[in-house]
Image (tube, helix red, strand yellow):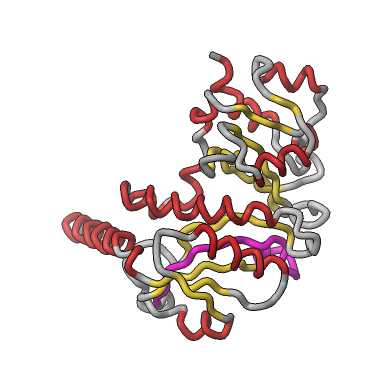
């Protein structure tokens, strides 16, 4: 049994390495199902920034027809919901690999390679769509990381839960509107030995859009109204290199509202203590 498990593990690693080593030779199908703003901006972001494989745009019908074909990868915006929700709550940008995953399952990781929360499904303003070019780079950087260390293929966004050491030499911009506890600007800065710049949300968006040099910013994604039992996603993103340096989520309750928690801030501020 031990020998069988060892052989199976070796096969899984071998097959997974082959999947990702061949990524650049396979077509990534970018699903553009409509003329909604989010779909149009995804098309633009991919056209300008996708560089690690050939790509083609396709319809939702094409996706359903081809998604079981292992010769393709797929990039698409999907609506997500939680067990207690009757309607989708958050849109996610997802990179998938094609293949048949029901019945006789393919060897290796599942269909989803990496999934990033983008916006509330009910958001018609496009408030967070300026993140799409950064997300495109985060996804491509993720593929590069997996190609260098195949074990990361089985971890998804979990590998980004603690990369805050890379913040040490960056200018961290932060809005107090994105924390879920009460703190004055002075109190908040004390977490970081005053080595954080408190700004408004417009300044954070500007830093993202202009690829501000050597800076990092927070992002919080929640469903519309941040209802209890839904998830709040919290990220720290570098604005010039487009690296995901922090990624965590927590379930929203009456006692734990949306936003970065004190525990998150203590973790993020650790590199600024020295």
Q: Tell me the quarter of the image containing the N terminus.
A: bottom left
Residue under the image location 45 percent in, 54 percent down: 140
Q: Residue at x 37, y 73 (%)?
A: 105
Q: Is residue 167 left or right of residue 250?
A: left
Measured as percent of width and height from the top left, residue 3 is found at 16, 57
Percent across and percent down for residue 191 are: 68, 20
The image shows residue 63, relative to residue 161, as above or below, that is below
Is 62 rendered above or below residue 242?
below
Identify which residue, 69 or 35, lies in the foreground: 35
Count up the numbered dots: 0
The magenta stretch is 79-99
Q: Is residue 93 magenta?
A: yes
> Is residue 146 shown left or right of residue 241?
left
Closer to the camera in the image, 85 or 133: 133
> Horizontal and vertical percent for residue 252?
74, 47
Left or right position of 127 against 64: right
- Queried whether the magenta region covers residue 53, the answer comes back as no
At x 61%, y 24%, the residue is 269
Q: Identify which residue is drawn at 69% across, 51% down.
A: 231
Q: Residue furthest left?
A: 3
Residue 199 percent location from the top left of the image: 76, 31
| Residue 265, picture quadrant | top right
Kindly indicate the quadrant of the structure image that contains residue 125: bottom right
Could you say which is closer to the camera, residue 15 or residue 252?
15
- Reply above or below: 6 against 273: below
């Amino acid at each position: 049994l031990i020998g069988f498990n060892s052989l199976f593990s070796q096969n899984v690693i071998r097959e997974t390495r082959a999947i990702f080593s061949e990524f650049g030779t396979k077509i990534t199908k970018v699903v553009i199902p409509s003329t909604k703003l989010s779909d149009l901006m995804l098309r633009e972001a991919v056209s300008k920034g996708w560089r690690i494989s050939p790509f083609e745009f396709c319809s939702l019908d094409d996706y359903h027809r081809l998604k079981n074909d292992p010769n393709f990868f797929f990039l698409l915006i999907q609506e997500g919901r939680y067990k207690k929700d009757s309607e989708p709550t958050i849109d996610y940008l997802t990179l998938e690999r094609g293949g048949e995953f029901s019945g006789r399952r393919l060897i290796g990781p599942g269909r989803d390679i990496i999934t990033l929360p983008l916006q509330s499904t009910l958001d018609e303003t496009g408030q967070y769509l300026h993140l799409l070019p950064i997300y495109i780079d985060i996804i491509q950087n993720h593929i590069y990381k997996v190609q260098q260390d195949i074990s990361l293929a089985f971890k998804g966004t979990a590998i980004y839960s603690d990369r805050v050491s890379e913040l040490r030499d960056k200018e961290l911009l932060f809005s107090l509107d994105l924390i879920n506890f009460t703190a004055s600007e002075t109190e908040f800065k004390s977490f970081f030995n005053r080595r954080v710049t408190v700004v408004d949300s417009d300044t954070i968006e500007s830093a993202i859009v202009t690829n501000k040099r050597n800076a990092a910013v927070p992002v919080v994604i929640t469903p519309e109204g941040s209802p209890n039992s839904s998830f709040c996603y919290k990220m720290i993103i570098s604005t010039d290199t487009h690296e995901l340096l922090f990624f965590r989520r927590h379930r929203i309750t009456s006692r734990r509202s949306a936003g970065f928690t004190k525990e998150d801030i203590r973790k993020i501020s650790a590199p600024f203590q020295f």
